[in-house]
Image (spheres, rainbow, N blue to C red):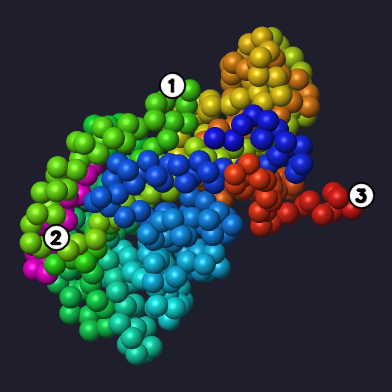
Amino acid sequence: MATREELLAAAGALGTPLYVYDLDLIRARLERLRDAFGRHFGVSFAVKSNPNVALLKALAPLVDSFDVSAFAEAERAIAAGMEPERLTFCGPGKRPEEIRRAVRIGLGELVVESLHEARLADRFAGELGTRQTVLLRINPATSPRAFGVNMSGKPSQFGIDEEEMAAAIDALAVLPNLDLAGFHIYSGSNSLSHEGLAENFGILTDIFRRATAHWGQKPRKLVFGAGFGVPYLPTDAEIDLAALAAEVLPGIDALKAEPAFAETELELELGRWLVGPCGWLLSSIIGAKASRGTELRICDAGFNTHLAAYGMMGSVIRRNWRIANLSNPEGSIERYTVVGPLCTTIDTLATKLELPATSIGDVIAIENSGAYGLTSSPTRFISHPEPREALLDGGRLTEVSESLLNHWRLADN
Ligand SMILES: Cc1ncc(COP(=O)(O)O)c(C=O)c1O
């Protein structure tokens, strides 16, 4: 885990706002995941959670697949050294040109989310004189009660409704240039509930069994959208992976004991659990004032740099994330409202936040920022400098920024 000194040194060397990703910690989490689930499941990393090419380069040799959600993410993955055959391509709005390119590069599995997509892929594969391997994405009719973000059981652009899966399998099976390899389900994310996660594995296994029975073939691959959450809030606790595995794996053993699944490759697809806790957004306090009884601290990272930490990525209520004052960790605890530099009242990072006494020049760290940080943020809003990005590997800091929008002009003055 990156130390306070390492993070402060990074902020000193590269300035703020700055995202720092700790590769040692990513490797350690992956090892924990493999220890708990590795005998049964491969690991697929969802590139959308952090598409930084240098980070992908470090991850490519460590995981089994990358899941991409746009052809440009496939290009990033390939630039990072990932083989096209180890890519899956999900996404409800693939453009025809993206599908054609995916087929042309020999992408591992195209995850078809509609029959329209399947027919396009079939046509392009025919034109290119090849066959495209596909997985059918199924949208469950039910989902665990205790799940966080939930995509199933309602009208949805994601995958084929479970109620329609039999007809879709029949329609897919006759497309001459497609090779159906199995099924994919991703129906919820960011759950910390042991009960909900375990129930989800049961729901997915049951659907996969029924889809396979209808199909009458042995699937080569089944993708389980894991939905593993991370403890964003101070009151959240990490998932107990070993306990979860102990509950879930007997059901998976039973599945694997059936002849149809004995040879099937199972994969856990996730993003935030792997990289979220391994990243920090470092920000400097650039203003301090008291207003009508509230101590305000203004930092240089607004929602333009981290939409999720500001509660704008699907949260119903904004809650304070885990934030630390790196510059003065031992100070007396005070209460602050922390805001960003944007000219709107919604640019509020934290209210009634208890932090060691914080003054102008201090560096704060927003924890759990390794996933859906920079990639999910509207960096062009109000044209502040885009955050830099850096990797920490064995204590060594390397800048891996991909865009330095607005930085150069500032540097010139
Ligand atoms: C198809 C698919 N797979 C994987 C993920 C990754 O989810 P998470 O980062 O919560 O693990 C998502 C997130 O939206 C997704 O839509």
Looking at the rendered structure, which numbered label has been put on residue 321? none
Q: Is mark 2 within 8 Å of ligand 1?
A: no
Residue at 54% x, 64% y is 80
Mark 1 or mark 3: whose residue is earlier in sequence: 1
Label 2, on which residue?
A: 261
Residue at 71% x, 39% y is 10
Label 3, on which residue?
A: 413
Q: Position of residue 369 (x, y in %)?
A: 55, 39
Find numbered disc 1 in the image and state the secondary structure of the residue it sits on: loop
Residue kind at label 2, given as amino acid type: Phe
- Locate residue 183 relative to residue 293 in the image: left or right: left
**In whole angstroms, how far apart are the C-alphas of marks 1 and 2?**
40 Å
Q: Between label 3 and label 2, give the one nearer the viewer.
A: 2
Query: What residue span does the magenta drawing correspond to?
Result: 199-217
Which SS type dominates the magenta stretch? helix
**In whole angstroms, how far apart are the C-alphas of marks 3 and 2?**
64 Å
Label 1, on which residue?
A: 235
When asked about the image quadrant of residue 123, the answer is bottom left
**In whole angstroms, how far apart are the C-alphas of marks 1 and 3?**
45 Å
Residue kind at label 1, given as amino acid type: Thr
